[in-house]
Amino acid sequence: MKKMIFPLILLAGGLTLLYFYSHQITESGQSVENINQPQGKIEIQDDQSGELPEQVGLAEQEESDADFIEAYWTYPIATKGDAPHTWSALEKNLKPEACAQCHVEQFDAWKKSLHAGAYSPGLIGQFPGMGHGEGNDCLKCHAPLAEQKYISNQDMLSSLKTKLQHPMGFSEKGELSKSGLPLRHAGVTCAACHVRGWQRFGPPQRNTGKTGKVKVDAHDGFTGIKGFEESNFCASCHQFPQSYAINGKPLENTVKEWKESRFAREGVHCQNCHMPDRKHEFRGIHDLEMTKKGLDFTLEKKGGGALLRIHSKWIGHAFPTYVTPKVVVLAEAIDHEGNILKTWQWEIIREVYFDEGWKEKRDTRLMPDETRDFEISEVPAKTDQVHYRVNVIPDHFYKGIYEGLLHDDLEVDAETLIRQAIDQAESNDYTLYEKSVRL
């Protein structure tokens, strides 16, 4: 056996907590021991005063969109101040079910997204071992509003029980009468992106392109901001600071990867792909069709072997962009009777680990517009065909974390949630591409 350091990473926009759990790892990669003591922590403190920056004023004073967005996400509070006394109970309601009464199409798309499921079993199952304060640090991205934070450890533990009783954090049908769950259970909800100080914000009005204050019947209209359609709007959660660089690259480096690509130069933003026609789907690597849309596959016979060519044609960042997924390219030499004579395997991944400091073991990801060949030059004599298969494991890294946590002395509800997370992660794997070429 060899002793390795296995990282449990809890990530949030502008803040990262790094916990390192010591494991005994066999050469086959099986964990047989876990020590339930954090080996180190890095933390950035931010303003927890509850004072909201003057975001509303920024829009009215026609400040730049970049300045507005930075202030918008500094410490988001939806209910700062008093709601207008003329508003109805529905207009004052922050629950997604309330928004669904008018914005049916947006709600129906959002409810199936990872944003709606951001308050996930795998996330909150870790919190009892951390405490509610550090749990709140993680909620900065998973449930961003101040109104969604825990007020005590008991509040946090009660929330775990509620999650087990109600796996979906809102009414799937948008029924207002069934919107009794805490707002945090809805994850990255409508209000997280669209409400500050009771006022509603969003992209420019669809039909007119109007920005600034736009009058509509409900909630005194909204403020249209061009920044809602730009990649920087996503950066607070999807771009970590350079101070957390590993081998020169932050752990999550999505927005910078985009800025260095042709997509940024051509004005193609995150929202163009992940929210096409303003659909609140937020699809990514967990979605087979979304992933397939971004890649071209070409399979051909070459010499006495075969070649699979993968081209990243419509992905505006690295594929995959984060450390959690792994993409496996498999090839098999098969004879006339269907017997496998030989196998080959390549992995597309950014693999990091902690050993007296963070290190990057390898980075084999595809950059935007990159083409890579997976070639077999020699095959066994009786080979009739070569079969290629590309498997995507979106939650590869998390699977290891969850399995490691089960070796700890977890609180009962936490263990149940972590086991749910393992099952969910396993179900997310899929085959992206599969084809054979005869030799």
Image: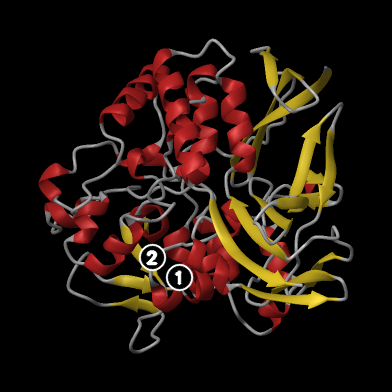
Visible residue check, residue 435: yes
Q: Quadrant of residue 405?
A: top right
Q: Is residue 251 left or right of residue 11?
A: right
Q: Position of residue 230 (x, y in %)?
A: 55, 72
Classify residue 291 by image quadrant: bottom right
Residue 140 spot, x, y in % from top left = 51, 42
Q: Residue at image x 72%, y 80%? A: 262
| Mark number, residue 354 | none
- Count the marks: 2
Residue 275, labelled with which disc? 1
Q: Decide if residue 64 is in sight here.
A: no
Q: Secondary structure at mark 2?
A: loop
What amino acid is labelled 1 in the image?
Met
Quadrant containing the C terminus is bottom right
- Please name the residue shown 45% across and 70% down the image: 275
Residue 296 horizontal side relative to residue 227, left or right: right
Structural distance between the alpha carbons of marks 2 and 1: 6 Å
Pointer 2 local density, CA inside 10 Å: few below 14, some 14–19, many at least 20: many
Q: Is residue 63 left or right of residue 252?
A: left
Q: Nearer the viewer, residue 254 or 54?
A: 254
Residue under numbered circle 2: 280
Image marks 2 and 1: residues in contact by CB distance under 8 Å = yes
- Tag 2: amino acid: His
Outermost residue, front side: 337
- At a point 72% along the width and 50% down the height, the residue shown is 241
**Residue 338 percent coordinates (x, y):** 65, 56
Whether 188 is drawn above or below 108: the answer is: above
Above or below, comparing residue 191 to residue 305 in the picture: above
